[in-house]
Amino acid sequence: MCGIVGYTGPKEARAILIDGLKKLEYRGYDSAGVALQHDGLLEIHKAAGSVADLEKTLVDNSNAVNVGIGHTRWATHGRPTDENAHPHCSCCKEIALVHNGIIENHQTLRKWLAEEADHKFSSETDTEVLVHLIEEYYEGDLLESVRKAVARIEGSFALVVVSSREPGRLVCARQDSPLIIGLGDGENLVASDIPALLAHTRKTKVLEDGDFASITSEGVEISDAEGKLLDKEIFEITWDIEAAEKGGYDHFMLKEIMEQPAAVKETLRQRIDTASGKVNLSELNFTTEELTSLEKIHIVACGTAYHAGILGKAVIEKIAKVSVEVDVASEFRYREPLLTENQLLIVISQSGETADTLAALRLARQKGLKVLAITNVVGSSVSREADEVFYTWAGPEIAVASTKAYLTQLIALYLFALYLAETRGRIDSAVYDELVSGLKALPGHIKTVLSEENLAKLHTYCDHLSRWDSAFFVGRNLDYPVAMEGALKLKEISYIHAEAYAAGELKHGPLALIVEGIPVIALITQKAVSDKTLSNIQEVNARGGAVFAITREGFDEIASQVESVFYLPPANDILAPVLSVVPTQLIAYYAALARGSSVDKPRNLAKSVTVE
Ligand code: F6R
């Protein structure tokens, strides 16, 4: 993620850029910056923090500025500091660039630029290599130098470049990250997303992968890598501003649910070696000795992240054969856990700021344990204090109810379990290969779960569910943590009281609450225990409960034994929870809609819980 905006025209560019960045802050909000072109030079302003912090640095309006680029950052490489904020500048300070994406071969390019061409770097970012490359190739035509630089890059990018030598011109390129041109009257704009354009125009041209653009106030030229001009259709926006910020969705939660295929793909990217098919976690600095001598792992987290931890325990124990304990962070230090140096603590936190999780991390470090953090926010407290960090690349999660962050936390745990299992020599190579190919297939399968037909089915089911004040989620084995997460999500945003039970536990008490029609959502994706779960479902049926089963293709005997059934695409038993949680998120969403509750900001809750 990251938000980009650019303007060229007769108006005062500062206000347009700041306003555009504020509209894009949902794409990243840890630092921001602008490059303003005027009087044959570039004026750069950057600030860690929000766009409002950046705005405070733009007090001097004495120069008329009509051209500029801006960026709001979601850190990937390098902490959220002033230096790492975009725009980045060439050595001669004549070229400035903003970028959204990841330059995968940045280390090789950086080395080459520094050693062979004497470029001086001033940030820790992957992006900075790009502006130095453009400078290296610059021979009087910015577009040509951008083409040459892009040809050397591996990775994803949306970029906008300005040069003090070419007044009034913006140059753009795109590969795997969005970029949209806004066509104005005597002015033109470019941005990562429509909200930044809407105050100025509804006429747009959408850049596609491999496209380049040269933009001035008079016109826009879009071309391919060889310089051939491309004729693009004009796309007229019909959304209003509020809908546009949510990408046309009614709520951030739904948008984030729909982003899950991309979030999972991004978290997997570069962590599975294409040539060898092996998990590559070279970003973690564990020695083989540390991993082979591990006696126990503790996983500590809160809420949804805790549910990811429970699933992580099952997966690590199954495939890496290391014993794992899981605690909610607010309980961990008070139970006086037995912590010794041959143990590892894994903390999981989307925000990286949860107070109880941080306290657990500090306790473990005090006791001499190494700490691995799984977090979504670069530069967060958890990422700074842990020994090792595994970033989930879900992008900013705005809705209070966590969805895409949870899925990427699961991916992180699967990858870590495979890496640990292989290092310890505890996994059969056929099982390993099956899991790796299963992981790679997940983004496509999640897309299938999110098909319009499936959304409609879940929406219809929620008409029944939303009339109840109480519901149950049940499952066995790996289905049980998914049931816990499904129940939490439903409680949190629809305010329906929901309980999760290991299906075999129903008869030990909760069965007393089963009455005619009560909604029971059963997760049945684990082959070894599906018959047993079905027996528990018969116990519910016999008391009039209405069972909605979430199962996967191939479990054909279930349909005739429940009121309704939802089929997931085929998946390996161990990976099935990544798919089965998605319909539970949508059930919570549609139930909340039906009950008119506030989906993105549920009552009494906050996104980042920094109190104990
Ligand atoms: C529920 C939810 C919370 C968080 C919990 C931990 O949808 O989002 O339960 O999972 O507050 O937050 P992080 O992961 O930021 O530590």
Image (spheres, rainbow, N blue to C red):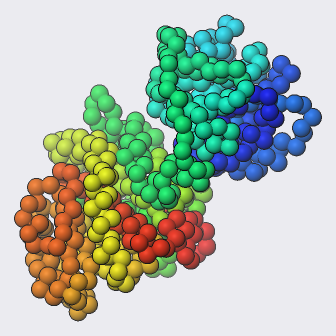
Name above or below for residue 580 compared with residue 196. Answer: below
Residue 233 visible, this angle:
yes
**Number of numbered tags placed on the structure image:** 0
Considering depth in this image, is 109 or 35 the residue closer to the camera? Answer: 35
Q: Quadrant of residue 184?
A: top right
Q: Residue at x 40, y 44 (%)?
A: 262
Q: Residue at x 35, y 74 (%)?
A: 487
* Quadrant for the C terminus in the image: bottom right
Horizontally, is 303 left or right of 571 in the view? right
* Quadrant for the N terminus in the image: top right
Name above or below for residue 358 compared with residue 542. Answer: above
Residue 301 visible, this angle:
no
- Residue 166 position, x and y percent, is 74, 16
- Residue 548 position, x and y percent, is 22, 71
Toward the top, the furthest residue is: 139
Q: Residue at x 73, y 26 (%)?
A: 186
Horizontally, is 501 left or right of 52 in the view? left
Q: Residue at x 33, y 64 (%)?
A: 459
- Residue 271 position, x and y percent, is 38, 39
- Residue 473 position, x and y percent, is 28, 75
Horizontally, is 479 left or right of 337 in the view? left
Toward the bottom, the furthest residue is: 512
Q: Quadrant of residue 437?
A: top left
